[in-house]
Image (cartoon, grey):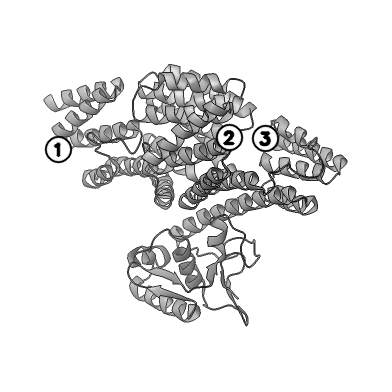
C-alpha cells in the first residue's frame, strides 16, 4: 500500500495501519507543505523568515520543527540539508503534488490545502498559503473537468453529471463548468434538466456579471445522448484533455507542472498522428512557454511555428489564428517587424470575438511600444468590448491592464486606476495567479504616484512573492523595477539600484528573454535614479537607454534619453 502524505483537508499521513496525525504542530505541517510544493529546495534562511519572523532565534526554532518533522515522517521521507530538501521514499506520495500534476489525489481527499490552518503571525507564509490554495483549487477543477470528459467518453453520463455539479458548486461563474453540466445532463437523456441548467446559468451570469453566457451553454443542451464520439481507443479525447489540464494548471500558477502536461499532450498527439490535434497541442505548449519561460524560448517559438504550419495544412482556422497571434506577440515583444504577422492573425480571427480581442491587444502593445498611445487605447477599447461580449474575463483583464499602462504613460492616472481595479477584480474572480504580479505592479506604480508608499510596498511584496513562485522572467523584472522605484522614492538610491540592476536584462546581441518595453522601462528608471543622485554610472546608463531606444525603435525612450543627457549637462 502506498503511503499518502495528506495536505488536502485535515493534514495527516495515511499508512498501512491507518491514519497518523504526526508530525504534530501547525508549524511542522506548514514547513512540510512549503517543502513539498516548492519547485526546488528552500534555504534555511528563507524558511526562518517565512515561519519564524518574530522569533529571537529563528534558526533554533527551525531546527526544532525540522526535528519534529523528521520523527513524524520517518521512514517514509527524509528531510534535511541547507537548502532543505524533502526526499520521499519509494511508494510515498503527496496528495497535493498529485493534484498539481493533473492527477486525482490517491487518498480521495478534495478539501482545501491545510484546511483550517492559519499562522497570523507569519504574513509571508499566509500569502504563500493563499496562493497555493488557489493553485490547488484550480488544478483540482482542471482534473475534474478532464474526468467529466472521460466519463462522457466512456458512456457513464451519471457520474459525469455528479462531477459537473461539483464543478459548478466550486466555481459557479466559470462558464466551462455549466457547459459540462448541461452536456452531461443531455448525454444522460435528461434534456429537461439540461435546458433548466442552461437557463439557471443565464440567470446567474445576468445577476452576478451583468452579461449573458456564450451560446455554447445553450448548444450543449442539444448534444447527442450517449456521450462523445471517440476513436476506438479514446486517444484523441485523452490528448485534448491533457491540453486543457495543462493550460489550467499553468494558469493557476503551477507553471512547471502545466508545461509538463502540455509536453505530454504533444507526445500523445504525435502518437495519434492527427495533425489537427497536433496543432492544438503545439499551439498550447508554445503559447504557455513564450509567456512563462522566456519570450524567445527556442522550443516555444518552434512549437508555435509547427502549429502554424499544421493548421495551414488542415484548414484549422482557430489554431492558426492563435499561432499567428502568438508569433506576432513574440515579434512585438522583441521589437521585430510584427505587422504582417498580426494582419494575418486578425484575418484568421475574423468572426471569433475572443480571438479578435486577443489579437487587438497584441496590436495595441506594439503601438504602445512605439509611443502611439492614442492609437493603442483605441485598439484596447475594442479588445475589451469584444472580450466582454465573448465572456472572456481573462482577455478583458489583460487588455485592461495594458490600457492602464497606456494611461500611465500618457499621464492619466485616474483612468489607469479605474482600469487596474477592474482588472484586479477579474483576476481575483478567475484565480488567474499567473497574471497577478503584472496587475499588482501597475497598481503599485499608481500608489507611488500618489505617495502611498505603504500601499505600494504591500502590493509589490505580494507581486514579488508570486513572481518568484512562478519564476516568470517578465514578472520578476516588472516587480523588481517597482521595488526599485519604491526604494528610490523613499530616498534609498543604493537599494533602488540593487533592485533595478537585478531586474534589467542586458541582452547585447542575444534574443531578449522579456519584452523590450520592460527592459526599456527598467533602464529608464535606472537613469532617473542615477541622474537624480548624480551617481558615477549616470552617463553610461543614459547612453545605454539611448542605444536600446534606437535599436528597438522606441521614440519615447529616445526622447527620455535626451532629457536625461540634458540634465547631466546642466
Q: What crowding class fits label 2: few (fewer than 14 Cα within 10 Å), some (14-19), or many (20 or more)? A: some
- Viewer-proximal residue, 414 or 345? 345
Q: Name the residue at 44% across, 78% down.
A: 70
The residue sitting at 42% across, 66% down in the picture is 51
Is 144 placed above or below 285 here? below
- Helix or strand or loop: what does disc 1 sit on? loop
Q: Position of residue 499 (x, y in %)?
A: 28, 46
CA gap, disc 3 and disc 2: 34 Å
Any part of residue 248 in sight: yes
**Pointer 1 or 2: first along the chain:** 2
Give percent across and percent down for residue 10: 61, 69
The image position of residue 174, as x and y in percent, is 66, 42
Name the residue that disc number 3 marks: 209
Q: What is the distance, in whole Å, between disc 3 and disc 1 at their CAs?
A: 51 Å
The residue under the point 24% across, 43% down is 501
- Residue closest to the eye, 432 or 160: 160
- Give the residue at mark 1: 537
For disc 2, the marked residue is 276
Sooner in the amino-acid sequence: mark 3 or mark 1: 3
- SS at badge 3: loop
Can residue 173 be seen in the rendering of this structure? no
The nearer-to-camera label among 1 and 2 is 2
> What label does residue 565 carry, if any?
none
Amino acid at each position: 500500500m502506498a503511503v499518502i502524505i495528506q495536505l488536502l483537508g485535515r493534514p495527516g499521513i495515511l499508512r498501512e495501519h491507518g491514519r497518523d496525525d504526526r508530525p504534530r504542530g501547525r508549524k511542522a505541517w506548514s514547513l512540510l507543505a512549503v517543502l513539498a510544493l516548492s519547485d526546488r529546495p528552500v534555504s534555511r534562511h528563507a524558511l526562518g523568515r517565512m515561519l519564524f519572523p518574530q522569533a529571537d532565534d529563528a534558526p533554533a526554532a527551525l531546527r526544532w520543527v525540522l526535528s519534529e518533522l523528521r520523527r513524524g515522517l520517518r521512514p517514509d521521507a527524509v528531510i534535511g540539508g541547507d537548502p532543505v530538501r524533502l526526499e520521499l521514499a519509494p511508494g510515498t506520495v503527496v496528495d497535493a503534488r498529485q493534484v498539481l500534476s493533473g492527477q486525482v489525489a490517491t487518498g480521495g481527499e478534495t478539501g482545501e490545502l491545510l484546511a483550517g490552518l492559519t499562522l497570523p503571525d507569519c504574513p509571508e507564509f499566509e500569502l504563500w498559503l493563499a496562493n497555493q490554495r488557489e493553485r490547488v483549487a484550480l488544478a483540482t477543477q482542471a482534473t475534474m473537468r478532464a474526468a467529466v470528459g472521460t466519463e462522457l467518453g466512456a458512456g457513464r453520463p451519471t457520474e459525469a453529471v455528479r462531477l459537473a455539479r461539483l464543478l459548478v458548486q466550486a466555481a459557479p461563474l466559470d462558464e466551462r463548468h455549466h457547459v459540462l453540466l448541461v452536456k452531461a445532463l443531455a448525454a444522460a437523456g435528461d434534456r429537461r434538466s439540461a435546458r433548466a441548467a442552461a437557463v439557471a446559468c443565464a440567470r446567474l451570469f445576468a445577476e452576478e456579471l451583468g452579461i449573458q453566457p456564450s451560446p455554447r451553454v445553450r448548444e450543449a443542451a442539444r448534444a447527442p445522448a450517449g456521450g462523445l464520439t471517440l476513436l476506438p481507443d479514446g486517444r484523441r479525447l485523452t490528448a485534448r484533455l491533457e491540453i486543457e489540464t495543462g493550460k489550467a494548471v499553468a494558469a493557476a500558477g503551477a507553471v512547471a507542472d502545466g508545461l509538463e502536461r502540455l509536453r505530454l499532450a504533444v507526445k500523445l498527439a504525435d502518437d495519434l498522428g492527427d495533425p489537427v490535434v497536433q496543432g492544438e497541442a503545439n499551439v498550447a505548449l508554445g503559447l504557455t512557454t513564450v509567456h512563462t519561460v522566456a519570450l524567445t524560448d527556442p522550443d516555444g517559438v518552434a512549437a508555435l511555428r509547427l502549429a502554424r504550419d499544421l493548421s495551414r495544412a488542415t484548414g484549422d482556422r482557430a489554431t492558426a489564428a492563435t499561432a499567428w497571434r502568438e508569433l506576432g506577440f513574440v515579434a512585438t515583444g522583441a521589437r521585430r517587424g510584427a505587422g504582417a504577422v498580426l494582419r494575418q492573425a486578425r484575418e484568421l480571427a475574423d468572426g471569433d470575438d475572443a480571438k479578435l480581442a486577443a489579437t487587438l491587444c497584441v496590436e495595441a502593445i506594439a503601438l504602445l511600444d512605439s509611443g502611439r498611445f492614442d492609437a493603442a487605447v483605441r485598439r484596447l477599447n475594442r479588445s475589451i468590448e469584444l472580450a466582454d461580449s465573448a465572456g472572456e474575463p481573462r482577455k478583458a483583464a489583460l487588455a485592461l491592464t495594458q490600457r492602464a499602462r497606456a494611461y500611465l504613460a500618457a499621464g492619466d492616472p485616474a483612468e489607469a486606476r479605474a482600469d487596474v481595479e477592474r482588472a484586479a477584480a477579474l483576476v481575483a474572480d478567475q484565480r488567474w495567479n499567473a497574471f497577478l504580479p503584472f496587475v499588482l505592479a501597475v497598481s503599485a506604480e499608481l500608489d507611488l504616484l500618489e505617495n502611498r508608499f505603504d500601499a505600494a510596498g504591500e502590493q509589490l511584496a505580494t507581486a514579488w512573492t508570486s513572481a518568484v513562485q512562478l519564476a516568470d522572467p517578465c514578472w520578476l523584472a516588472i516587480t523588481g523595477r517597482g521595488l526599485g522605484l519604491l526604494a528610490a522614492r523613499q530616498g534609498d538610491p543604493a537599494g533602488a539600484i540593487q533592485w533595478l540592476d537585478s531586474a534589467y536584462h542586458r541582452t547585447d546581441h542575444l534574443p531578449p528573454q522579456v519584452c523590450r518595453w520592460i527592459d526599456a522601462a527598467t533602464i529608464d528608471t535606472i537613469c532617473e535614479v542615477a541622474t537624480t543622485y548624480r551617481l558615477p554610472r549616470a552617463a553610461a546608463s543614459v547612453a545605454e537607454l539611448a542605444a536600446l531606444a534606437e535599436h528597438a525603435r522606441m521614440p519615447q525612450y529616445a526622447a527620455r534619453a535626451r532629457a536625461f543627457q540634458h540634465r547631466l549637462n546642466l
